[in-house]
Amino acid sequence: MKAALFILIASAVLPFDGRLDGFSTDESVVVSVDESTVYRTVPASNAPATSRFHRFPVFACIDPEAQRSAEIAATCAAALTLGDLPECTDDEILLDPLFISTRDNHTAPWSTWTLASGPECIGPADLADEAARAFHEMQIHPATLNVQPPNGWTIVHFDTIVHTDNPDEAAQETTTELLGIPVQIRAQPAEYTWDFGDGTTQTTTDPGKPYPDHTITHQYTALQTYTVTLTTQWTGQYRIAGATTWTDVPGTATTTSTSNPLDVLELTPRLVTDPLAQY
């Protein structure tokens, strides 16, 4: 698709008002540009004070009002020479051309915007580091820990059943922006460690099931009060909002769930009078 065609289509969606409002003057965050990437943000304290960057929508150049500004006219002249737009896959998005403005010192005026790089596709691989950081900062709710019998007691030498939610139901998602791009982050339970409080643990990939289809059980051998602890290991994935494919995040996250105190009791059988015998 030619750039001119793209401009005509997009201008109907978001016409340009001829002002410079589209250019950011906020210096709190800038984009670090080198030959390998243009997507890594850096704090202002580490950023060069004599450069600023901005992605300018090429389609704004179709508005005649834009030509009233010498700055925008120069920007448009550079943008319109870009030719064909890159063809992005379903898991990528198209970024507007990147422009740079410079100044000699802190008090000097900024120069007009000049083209730093043309429109380009950005995909999951470009966001890998930021996605990993977002996953490890994600607030994951601990998995639900269910113990049966459910009333705070169980029977010595009998099966005590534990289980948690199905992994698909337990998965947690959040949407955030990474370098200005909306991205979905997902956490999924992958492994469970069941600590029964008596020195016995089990590690499974099975979340367990409730009675009568239970799959994870434990028998206590002493009449004491115990606490069951579930440690869940979570894996992460991410995708650009609207894409269909999830990409794995390196590393895992861990949450801990604890039961209420569990009393282990002993049942003593005894003979009783048949209540129906009197009839």
Image: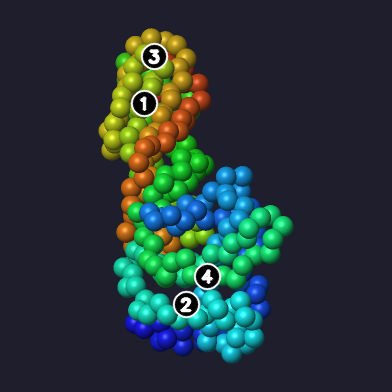
- Mark seen at residue 79: 2
Q: Is residue 144 left or right of residue 52?
A: left
Q: Which residue is mark 1?
A: 194
Task: Look at the numbered discs 3 and 4 and tell me whether their residues touch, using CB distance below 8 Å.
Answer: no
Residue type, numbered disc 3: Asp
Amino acid carrying mark 4 in the image? Thr
- Look at the image and tell me whether residue 205 can be seen: yes
Which element is circle 4 on?
A: strand
Q: Residue at x 45, y 48 (%)?
A: 130
Q: Is residue 134 above or below residue 240?
A: above
The disc labelled 1 sits on which kind of residue? Trp
Quick check: 242 above or below 27? below
Q: Which mark is residue 198?
A: 3
Dot 2 amino acid type: Ala
**Residue in the image at 58% along x and 64% along y:** 101
Give the distance between the C-alpha atoms of the residues marked 3 and 4, in whole angstroms: 69 Å
Q: Residues under labels 3 and 1: Cα distance?
A: 11 Å
Where is the C terminus found, in terms of image quarters?
Answer: top left
Q: CA distance from mark 4 to mark 1?
A: 60 Å
Q: Of all residues shown, which one is farthest toward the front?
A: 104
Earlier along the polypeptide chain: callout 1 or callout 2? 2
Q: Is residue 124 above or below residue 209?
A: below
The image shows residue 81 at horizontal and vertical percentages of 42, 80
